[in-house]
Image (cartoon, coloured by chain):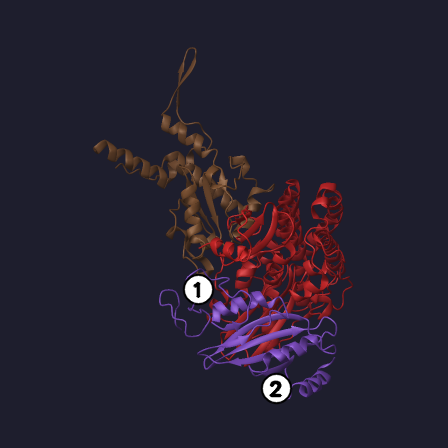
């Protein structure tokens, strides 16, 4: 589906989401209706977003944002979904039962940013050594006087 | 403890494969006079078996040095063992990070004496391109194990690695590696005690 | 440091305490083909029950480090990530910066970039072939593979200055013009290499022992491959159409004729055959382009200090292992605010557990060989 048709379809399916234009369509969702929206995006036959190719997190200094890039192998349309999270206690539902690739991506976001994924099958450290729980290195307020030079 | 001076011209002029010792001619042939230490050092330096330990990009240049164009088995490093129990020299090819440092220390401890270490590439020498602003890289492998020869480059050419191996051979023949200085120190200490 | 006791408790929970489960480490120190990968395998006799990869032994925190480097400097940290397709990684980063600044790359630079990409793809697949044959047990292909790779390294060294981590791509084009000998040497290489692929087929592909070791091993269906996010030749062996050069063409790929290789076998032998056929396709792309390099500039004019406008930019490019993604979030300064590299090996590795359950430990090596993992790419 081309971008304009996709935009119309998404606005009628998710009335509470805001959609921005760019190279790809960006859809901002709230944490509450996140999981149901993802299931609709995957299972509805006209949309069929079955290929999640990037899942990451960005630390804006007042809040965190989860970013999901997805693609459809059948229709070749892309979508970017963004969810705003609270900085002090970030929690969001997992999507690893919808796309199996999210298991590893979410473990990585958990250890680098500290986001807690509810109902994840196996949430523990993937890349950092033991003992680094809680020290989320990719946050902007990560202090390491030995190694990091403040510019 | 005796400290040997490192004289560079003496180092360059000897041929690396020469058997140590002097031949005194006599009517029925010759008599070879040498020291047992020199013969043992000569034998050890010409059959060093490297341990296969490549973590990142320098491992590809190490594999190139082992294959047919820049062959290193002409110098005696024919058999590259995968287990540290049977290896003599460990070539650290790649970056060492916080999680890998205990593994490297364990491998070094499992090797049998006498053992030598070559730090290959900029990452193993001093942290390399990952020196500033990384929270997980160890800035130089010599914070973990004692190193004999450093090779510069990112990655060093295979010829540079072979030159480093030949330098290590020369060092062994002169008795200047950390291993040998430590052994000498022990013997002097035992004499004193 | 090793979590074997926790894994044993988890695996045996709910079952009667049967003495039969063995947990082994395929440790961080391998014969240096794949890098430092630590697999904790739970076995029952010789049958695998669970495979768990432990990563992080080469985690060099490149994403955090790049937040303090300028837009011209961070490109070269990616050549150390997937060092076998270093040109292609640099190309992807340069394309992302160009997308942000909206720079037009001159046609000569585009053709040179595509030629370097395809030569790198051949070098990477040839090394994969040698390493895979060595894992399965044949030692001769390893030396044959390095013979061809040395020819490509010589070509690269004349034009780019280095053999393995060639810092050649800049935002706007390429750093220097190609050497005058480039065309002649590439044509000699193409003529020499065509006969060699037939030799490789005769030596390994048609070998009965090799076929018995890889047919039927490591089965993953098409839907599972898409769900696990697999890309590259590993996914094309299961019939997934995912070649970025065909789906979202960039540079001059929409002007050359080549086929996307798909195979429906879904096992290790299919992935092997896909990569060998891709070698022939890359040769044909090089043949079409080598005589038609247009004249002109090799680099577009850019300012000395680059500043991307505020926004987010994502580029997808096809490396030898699959789809590589560069995601830059910029706040308008001279250094990026957040960079994320989506590496192909990360998703391919997560499918290893699914593929390996129920097979024997001896088949693990054949499976990992056809997935073609480069561990610094996964750990970043």
The quadrant of the image that shows the C terminus of chain B is top left
The quadrant of the image that shows the N terminus of chain B is top left
Is the residue at mark 2 from the same chain as the one at mark 1? Answer: no
Q: Looking at the image, which is closer to me, C359 or C351?
A: C359
Where is residue C230 drawn, in percent x and y?
Answer: 65, 63
Where is residue B122 drawn, in percent x and y?
Answer: 46, 54
Disc 1 crowd rating (10 Å Cα; few below 14, some 14-19, many 20+) is: many
Label 2 resides on the chain identified as A
Above/below status of C99 relative to C81 = below
Which element type, helix, strand or loop, lies under badge 1?
Answer: loop
Q: Looking at the image, which is closer to me, A8 or A133?
A: A133
- Chain identity for the colour red used in the image: C
Q: Which residue is found at the position 50% from the left and 61% from the top?
A: A127
Chain B on-screen colour? brown
Mark 2 sits on what residue? A17
Q: Looking at the image, which is closer to me, A28 or B143?
A: A28
Disc 2 crowd rating (10 Å Cα; few below 14, some 14-19, many 20+) is: some
Q: Can residue C93 be seen here?
A: yes
Q: How many marks?
A: 2
Mark 1 sits on what residue? B134
Residue at the limit of the structure toward the front, as seen here: C16
Label 1 resides on the chain identified as B
Which element type, helix, strand or loop, lies under badge 2?
Answer: loop
Residue C254 falls left or right of residue C63: right
Q: CA distance from mark 2 to mark 1?
A: 38 Å
- Chain identity for the colour purple used in the image: A
Q: Which numbered marker is on residue A48?
A: none
Residue B142 falls left or right of residue C123: left
Q: Which residue is found at the position 66% from the left and 43% from the top?
A: C141
Above/below status of A139 relative to B74 = below
């Amino acid at each position: 589906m081309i971008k304009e048709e996709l935009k119309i379809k998404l606005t009628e399916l998710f009335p509470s989401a805001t959609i921005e234009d760019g190279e790809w369509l960006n859809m901002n969702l709230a944490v509450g209706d996140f999981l149901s929206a993802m299931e609709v995006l995957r299972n509805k036959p006209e949309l069929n977003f079955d290929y999640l190719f990037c899942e990451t997190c960005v630390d804006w200094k007042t809040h965190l944002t989860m970013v999901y890039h997805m693609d459809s192998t059948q229709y070749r349309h892309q979508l970017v979904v963004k969810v705003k999270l609270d900085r002090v206690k970030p929690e969001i539902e997992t999507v690893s039962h919808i796309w199996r690739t999210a298991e590893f991506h979410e473990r990585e976001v958990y250890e680098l940013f500290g986001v807690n994924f509810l109902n994840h099958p196996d949430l523990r450290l993937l890349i950092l050594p033991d003992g680094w729980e809680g020290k989320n290195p990719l946050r902007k307020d990560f202090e390491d006087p030995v190694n990091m030079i403040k510019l | 403890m005796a400290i040997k001076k490192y004289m560079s011209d003496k180092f360059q002029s000897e041929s690396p494969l020469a058997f140590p010792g002097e031949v005194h001619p006599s009517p029925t042939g010759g008599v070879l006079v040498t020291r047992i230490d020199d013969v043992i050092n000569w034998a050890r330096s010409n059959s060093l078996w490297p341990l296969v330990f490549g973590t990142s990009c320098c491992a590809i240049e190490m594999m190139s040095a082992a294959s047919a164009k820049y062959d290193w088995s002409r110098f005696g490093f024919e058999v590259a063992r995968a287990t540290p129990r049977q290896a003599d020299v460990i070539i650290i090819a790649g970056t060492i990070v916080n999680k890998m440092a205990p593994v490297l220390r364990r491998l070094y401890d499992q090797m049998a004496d006498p053992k030598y270490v070559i730090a290959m590439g900029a990452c193993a020498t001093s942290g390399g391109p990952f020196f500033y602003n990384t929270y997980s890289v160890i800035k130089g492998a010599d914070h973990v194990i004692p190193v004999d020869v450093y090779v510069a480059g990112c990655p060093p050419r295979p010829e540079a690695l072979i030159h480093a191996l030949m330098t290590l051979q020369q060092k062994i023949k002169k008795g200047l590696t950390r291993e040998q200085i430590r052994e000498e120190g022990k013997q002097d200490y035992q004499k004193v005690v | 440091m090793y979590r074997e006791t926790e894994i044993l408790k988890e695996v045996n929970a709910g079952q009667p305490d049967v003495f039969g489960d063995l947990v082994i480490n395929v440790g961080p120190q391998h014969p240096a083909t794949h890098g430092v990968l630590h697999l904790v395998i739970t076995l029952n006799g010789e049958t695998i029950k669970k495979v768990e990869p432990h990563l992080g032994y080469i985690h060099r925190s490149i994403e955090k480090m790049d937040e303090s480097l300028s837009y011209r400097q961070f490109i070269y940290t990616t050549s150390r990530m997937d060092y076998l397709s270093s040109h292609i990684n640099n190309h992807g980063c340069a394309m992302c910066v160009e997308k942000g600044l909206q720079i037009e790359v001159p046609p000569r630079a585009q053709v040179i970039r595509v030629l370097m990409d395809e030569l790198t793809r051949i070098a990477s697949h040839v090394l994969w072939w040698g390493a895979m044959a060595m894992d399965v047990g044949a030692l001769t292909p390893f030396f044959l593979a390095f013979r061809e790779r040395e020819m490509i390294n010589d070509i690269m060294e004349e034009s780019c200055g280095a053999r393995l981590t060639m810092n050649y791509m800049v935002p706007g084009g390429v750093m220097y013009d190609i050497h005058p000998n480039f065309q002649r040497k590439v044509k000699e290489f193409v003529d020499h290499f065509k006969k060699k692929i037939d030799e490789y087929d005769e030596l390994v592909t048609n070998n009965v022992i090799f076929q018995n070791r890889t047919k039927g091993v490591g089965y993953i269906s098409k839907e599972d491959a898409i769900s696990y996010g697999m890309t590259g030749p590993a996914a094309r062996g299961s019939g997934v159409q995912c070649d970025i050069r065909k789906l979202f063409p960039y540079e001059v790929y929409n002007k050359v004729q080549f086929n996307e290789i798909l195979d429906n076998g879904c096992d290790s032998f299919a992935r092997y055959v896909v990569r060998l056929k891709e070698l022939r396709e890359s040769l044909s792309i090089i043949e079409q382009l080598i005589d038609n390099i247009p004249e002109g500039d090799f680099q577009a004019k850019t300012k000395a200090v680059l500043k991307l406008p505020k926004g987010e930019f994502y580029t997808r490019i096809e490396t030898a292992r699959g789809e590589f993604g560069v995601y830059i979030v910029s706040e308008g300064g001279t250094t990026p605010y957040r960079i994320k590299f989506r590496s192909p090996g990360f998703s391919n590795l997560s499918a290893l557990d699914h593929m390996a359950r129920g097979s024997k430990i001896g088949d693990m090596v054949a499976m990992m060989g056809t997935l073609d993992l480069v561990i610094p790419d996964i750990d970043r």
